[in-house]
Amino acid sequence: MQILTTKSELRSALSGPAQTGLVPTMGFLHEGHMSLFRQARAENERVVATVFVNPTQFGPTEDLDRYPRDPDGDAAKCAESGVDILWMPPRDEVYGPRHATTVTVAGLTDGLCGRSRPTHFAGVATIVTKLFALVRPERAYFGEKDYQQLAVIRQMAADLDLGVDVIGMPIVREADGLAMSSRNKYLSAEDRAAALALSRALRAAAEAFDAGSRDADTLVAGLTAELHAAPGVALEYAEIVDAETLAPATGTLAGPARALVAARVGQTRLIDNIAIG
Ligand code: AMP
């Protein structure tokens, strides 16, 4: 595996023709990321992973400066998962001093996490566009863990004819249900126990649907009540939306839907989601 840091090294490493799968990450890698690397390995001749804590997707009061980092551990996990090229650029390599371009996706970014993180998805769309332009992959792999992000990137790739097949991968969870996340490192033992309420409440909503409960408002009310009652959990939102358009579901659920939640547990903001139906 090659570990590269500059754009020019990356360009020369990619010069030969090979079908390429790209997996963008912010590092502090875990099994969720590794599932993406392995899928990319299975479907492409060449696998490129990137580790870059992208400053433009963090708000001014968010955790950019304390975001967990482990470059050596990340390199080992990439090598173990079949990555060919790991690009870990320093911040200045990615954004020039006069960088002035932002990619925004309208509509999909208004609700859910976009409400409390109004600049987040523009930061994500911009860095992913840059990575697509640098690597020119045939396929790019993203986790359903960040469900709204996946929808935004799919929309952007289609709207801008980027020619990249955007592939969504299932959420990898700890044995007790907690969705794996680099930010779980912030959780104290007490927070960690409290955080289980998110996956538990989502599972309960999916099970209620499976048992015949079809009214979106009733399901959302149940989800909200369970999370409001959970000790140590400050709920930001609990919603059920159309799985594709992310439009809030109302009345009787017809097509595929997704339940999504965001909550603060201690100082840590966590998100999770589940398919409904
Ligand atoms: P991050 O490093 O948090 O920006 O995540 C990089 C990629 O890994 C994104 O596409 C995430 O959706 C994905 N990812 C993060 N956690 C998980 C997980 N638990 N299961 C599946 N994919 C994940």
Image: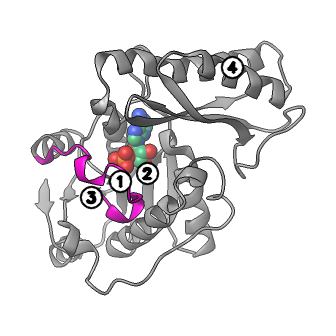
Q: Determine if the C-beta at disc 1 is less than 8 A from ligand 1.
A: yes
- Label 2 and label 4: CA atoms lie apart by 34 Å
Secondary structure at numbered mark 1: strand
Q: In what quadrant of the picture does the C terminus appear?
A: top right
Q: Is residue 191 above or below residue 36?
A: above
Secondary structure at numbered mark 2: strand
Q: Residues within 10 Å of mark 4 (few under 14, many from 20)?
A: few
- Label 2 and label 1: CA atoms lie apart by 5 Å
Residue at image coords 81%, 39%: 255
Q: Which residue is mark 2?
A: 141
Residue at far left of view = 72
Q: Which residue is mark 3?
A: 52
**Magenta span:** 50-71
Q: Can you give x and y, in whole percent of width and height, for residue 83 in the image?
A: 23, 50
Q: Determine if the C-beta at disc 3 is less than 8 A from ligand 1.
A: no
Discs 2, 1 touching: Cβ within 8 Å: yes
The quadrant where residue 203 appears? top right
Q: Tell me, yes or no, whether the highlighted magenta stretch contains residue 247.
A: no
- Label 4 and label 1: CA atoms lie apart by 37 Å
